Image (tube, grey):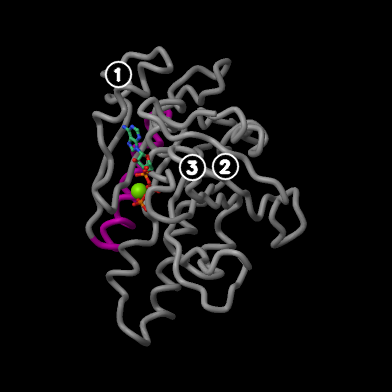
Amino acid sequence: RKSVVRITTGSQALDELLGGGIETLCITEAFGEFRSGKTQLAHTLCVSTQLPIHMHGGNGKVAYIDTEGTFRPERIVPIAERFGMDANAVLDNIIYARAYTYEHQYNLLLGLAAKMAEEPFRLLIVDSVIALFRVDFSGRGELAERQQKLAQMLSRLTKIAEEFNVAVYITNQVIADPGGGMFITDPKKPAGGHVLAHAATIRLMLRKGKGEQRVCKIFDAPNLPEGEAISFYIIYTVTSGGIMD
Ligand code: ATP
Ligand code: MG
């Protein structure tokens, strides 16, 4: 049996909310409006995953699948410096691929599994997991097929998490929810419907606060009653050095 590794997010408050950091062997999803910090958290995790275990890292490499073209190697540099790591060495351990269609995204995962069998990876990022599905299946009547393909992709991600003991961090978008849905005060909900809701073990809802502050709420943690959100939230800051308290 593989044992869970917890990787620091860079924010102590967020780590505490997560029980020590984002976990291997499962999928952690971050959803929230634009500029809420989903991609900057991904950048931070690219670095912190490479820290040794005793520094709350994962001592492993990172695979980054980018569907929006928002990965910035130059953003990694100040984050690496903040953690006292050599930026070039950190960048060398990030395997990056840009995906252009949902099929391409799926095929990249198949290729990555082969790589992960040979090298010690500890994190797989897909930013964003759903954007290409929303483009490739934009027509009415295509929703059922989209959800089926999405389920296939998510099941592949779960397999990778379990087989290679990696943390899977995916980002998601929010869509309008006229019914109010899970957020009475916020007429938005995560995209992907129940297929995504059931695949992600941990769902983080990110929201903009004052200035560089961001608010995070956690949903669907396994230790909580189903569908119930933790009633408290934490605040972290987005900086050039990554996510911080
Ligand atoms: P989207 O939905 O558009 O993908 P996002 O949730 O991924 O948005 P980020 O790209 O992570 O959002 O941006 C979050 C915030 O981080 C933004 O307010 C941005 O101004 C800030 N930010 C990004 N890079 C830096 C940096 N190098 N220094 C300081 N702040 C930054
Ligand atoms: Mg982003």
Callout 2 amino acid: Leu
Question: Dividing the image into 4 quarters, which one contains the N terminus?
Answer: top right
- Residue at horizontal 24%, vertical 48%? 69
Callout 1 amino acid: Ala
Q: Which mark is residue 25?
A: 2
In whole angstroms, how far apart are the C-alphas of marks 1 and 3?
Answer: 30 Å
Seen as rendered, the residue at the extreme front is: 210
Q: Main secondary structure of the magenta part?
A: helix
How many numbered badges does the structure rendering display? 3
Counting from the top left corner in percent of width and height, residue 160 is at 47, 46
Q: Which residue is mark 3?
A: 210
The mark nearer the N terminus, 1 or 3, is 1
- Foreground of the two, 71 or 198: 71
In whole angstroms, how far apart are the C-alphas of marks 2 and 1?
Answer: 27 Å
Counting from the top left corner in percent of width and height, residue 127 is at 36, 49
Q: Describe the element under mark 1 as helix, strand or loop.
A: helix
The mark nearer the N terminus, 3 or 2, is 2
- Foreground of the two, 121 or 215: 215
Q: Describe the element under mark 2 as helix, strand or loop.
A: loop
In whole angstroms, how far apart are the C-alphas of marks 3 and 2?
Answer: 34 Å
Counting from the top left corner in percent of width and height, residue 106 is at 33, 57
Q: Which residue is mark 1?
A: 87
Q: Nearer the viewer, mark 1 or mark 3?
A: 3
- Foreground of the two, 163 or 194: 194
Q: Which mark is residue 218?
A: none
Question: Dividing the image into 4 quarters, which one contains the C terminus?
Answer: top right
- Residue at horizontal 61%, vertical 49%? 217
Dot 1: few (<14), some (14–19), or many (≥20) neighbours within 10 Å?
Answer: some
State the extent of the magenta-drawn residues as a range: 101-120
Seen as rendered, the residue at the extreme bottom is: 141
Q: Do the CB atoms of the residues marked 3 and 2 lie less than 8 Å apart? A: no
Dot 2: few (<14), some (14–19), or many (≥20) neighbours within 10 Å?
Answer: many
